[in-house]
Amino acid sequence: MLDYFFNPKGVAVIGASIDRTKGGFFLLRNALVGYRGKIYPVNPKYNEIQGVQSYPDIRSIPENFDLALYFIPAKFLPDTIRECARKGVKAIIIESSGFSEVGKEGERLQTESLALARQYGIRLWGPNCMGYLDGHSMYAFSFMRIEGWVPLMKAGNVSFIVQSGMLSAGFLMMILERGGMGISKACSIGNKCDVNETELLEYFINDERTEVIGCYLESIIDGRRFLELARGSDKPIVVLKGGRSDVGTRAVMSHTASMSGSDAVYTGAFMQAGIVQVYDLYELMDVVRGFSKTKSYTPRSGTAVMTFSGGAAIVTTDLLADSGINLAELSSETLAELAKLFPSWAKPANPLDLWPAVEAGDAYTVYTASVKALFADPAVDSIIVEAFAFGFNGSDFFSIIRELMNKYGKPIAVWAIGIGPILSAFRTAVEDAGLPVFSEIKRCAEFFAGVRRHFIKKEKLREYSR
């Protein structure tokens, strides 16, 4: 049934507008960007909106259609559902607010509307949401006012489920501006009176274009089913759970009228289901981006760290220990190979402080030879590379790393330090090579902790299926 949302035959925009200050203007404008089927603006004030014939009401639309985008006051929803039923509508995305999140009257209206929709066999998405965007089809069934989002949108392997309206818009804008990650679908589900996160999770688990799933959730409907789906999936599922504190729980009730639940219960359940839990939006974005570029990992031994600073090496070691990650014990062969790069007074070890070798030689040669030696060491199952942004611009260093990562099936995380345009260009070069890059060393450790948990779970799933 979700295909009527994601692949509709005909779309009505109820509340379309010519006023650039109104959400109805952007709802229609966005729909016109990517959707190539018939679009029917509905507004009795106009005969034409944004170059498309407009209709005074739903019944005057000459053909049947699958999907309605609803952006008029909440009180008109029951009558709209009845009119949509006469046109064979199968799905409605309700982007208006004024339902269960505003109190008893809104809750009554939402309950009445859902009962009507079920009577007529219509699925409801929302209300109090911002619809969705599809990076592959470029469908944008949302009133998000994102100027210039089209050139920023990049098709990819990550899908998001976000239980918030404006948050999903801001979050998506951060993703698009930051770059480095392609989007399959980004879904804002709001009050989720009908379509919910569990149904979408199942859809994305079965979706060939989705390889990584990221969620911001304030509550989970049918939690048992959600956890069963997550436990049985070999796709990374990363969740930011809102309402973990008592104060946060009360805020959730006033936001989407959802019951949040115990943080301890959720944390334990997520761990058992192999869900990677994160604790802020930037961490969600960073960890999901990292997973989108990490295809294989066999967690057997430990992590190797390449750094430009003894202090950075110490901090990284502490952070890895905090995340339960061991440092790899480098083999004598690897240490002997690395020693060739260093002056006689400096002895290589893990973490590998490369500064003495760089001073004695050059950064490109030292980093390239070091990363090759570390990848070849059986004791190393993952690598963190710490580098100044200006050190490798224009070089093929990161392409070499990508080839080694593919050859050995070992994940890597790059910590980049620098400023301004130089750092931005450096980050772009790393990501274009297909590698995850982070601006905080702590994030590298957190990412590897999540990757380790996920691939241990994935290995167990393979064993169970044999």
Image (cartoon, helix red, strand yellow):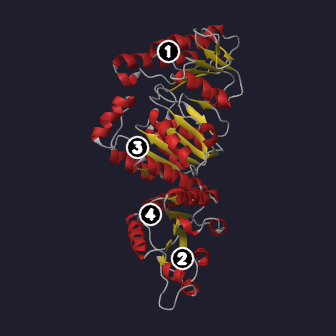
Q: What residue appears at the point 57 percent right and 76 percent down from the top-left corner?
A: 363
Q: Amino acid at mark 2?
A: Ala
Name the residue carrying label 4. Answer: 441
- Where residue 121 sits, quadrant-wise, is top right
Q: Amino acid at mark 3?
A: Lys
Left or right placement of residue 318 versus residue 449 in this view: left
Q: Secondary structure at mark 1?
A: helix
Distance of label 1 from label 4 (alpha carbons): 50 Å
Q: Earlier in the sequence, mark 1 or mark 3?
A: 1
Q: Secondary structure at mark 2?
A: loop
| Residue 421 against residue 309 in the figure, above or below | above
Distance of label 2 from label 3 (alpha carbons): 35 Å
Q: Earlier in the sequence, mark 1 or mark 4?
A: 1
Asked whether disc 3 touches disc 4, contact meaning CB atoms under 8 Å apart, the reply is no
Count neighbours of disc 1 (C-alpha within 10 A) and say few if under 14, some if 14 to 19, many if 20 or more.
many
Distance of label 1 from label 3 (alpha carbons): 30 Å
Name the residue carrying label 3. Answer: 241
* The furthest residue to the left: 246
Distance of label 1 from label 2 (alpha carbons): 62 Å
Q: Earlier in the sequence, mark 3 or mark 4?
A: 3
Q: What residue appears at the point 34 percent right and 21 percent down from the top-left corner?
A: 103
Q: Secondary structure at mark 3?
A: strand
Q: What residue appears at the point 40 percent right and 43 percent down from the top-left corner?
A: 241
* Residue nearest the observer in this picture, 367 or 155: 367
Q: Amino acid at mark 1?
A: Leu
Count neighbours of disc 3 (C-alpha within 10 A) and say few if under 14, some if 14 to 19, many if 20 or more.
many
Name the residue carrying label 2. Answer: 379
| Residue 411 against residue 190 in the figure, above or below | below
Image coordinates for residue 304, horizontal then vertical, percent: 51, 73
Q: Amino acid at mark 4?
A: Ile
